[in-house]
Amino acid sequence: MVTTPAVIFYDVIVAVHVMAIVIAFGVTFIYPVIVPWVTSKHPQALPAFHEMQDRIGRLIITPFATLALLTGIYLAADRDLFSEVWVTIPLVILIVLLGLGGAFFGPREKELAELARRDLDAGGTLSEEYHARAKIVGVVGGLSALLILFAIFCMVAKPFS
């Protein structure tokens, strides 16, 4: 009697891929709730908060997004799915998000930490420069969140196929 395993390797990789996405990007969805609250109620915590964002980016988001990328490439290659739009769009989005993490979010979060520290040390009021730069990071973060949600939609609903 030949038995088929209940779980195949491909399914394990699918699970790892989904877990990596949740771990990498889940935290980013709390920033729009936490940042305004910290800014208004505990501005003295902003330097540490922005340093924490940078640390999360380097130690959680980037490694787990990279794991998601590698497992996604394996899954697409194993089933010859690279020509599917529902695979290509999330792949491009993930590469864009990884690029934004290193080229945009990391440097901007360090800059926001320095600006907040400078402003608070100089008199306790956040400058217009800080607010303007934080707004840009917030807008790009919001657009990134929409990209993440669209990538998930593509992977689950498989539109355009």
Image: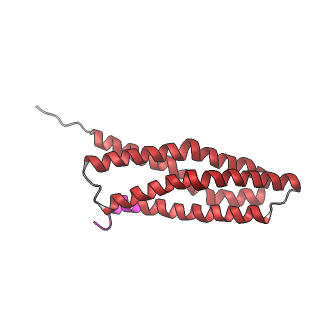
Residue pictured at 64% horizontal, 49% vertical: 53
Is-magenta flag for residue 156?
yes
Residue 42 lies within the magenta run: no
Which is nearer the eye, 82 or 146? 82
Residue at x 55%, y 43% (from the top left corner): 60
Tell me where residue 34 appears, x and y as whole percent.
66, 56
Task: Give the magenta range.
Answer: 153-161
What residue is at 48 percent from the left and 44 percent from the top?
64
Left or right, residue 15 beside residue 64:
left
Seen in the picture, residue 107 relative to 157 is either above or below; the reply is above
For the view shown, which residue lies furthest in the left direction?
A: 1
Query: 52 above or below 112?
Result: above
Farthest residue, direction right: 123
Q: How many marks?
A: 0
Q: Work out which residue is located at the far top of the displayed protein and give it.
A: 1
Q: Residue at x 47, y 59 (%)?
A: 148
x, y percentage for residue 5? 23, 36
Q: Which quadrant: the N terminus?
A: top left
Along the line of sight, which residue is nearer the eye, 69 or 153?
Answer: 69
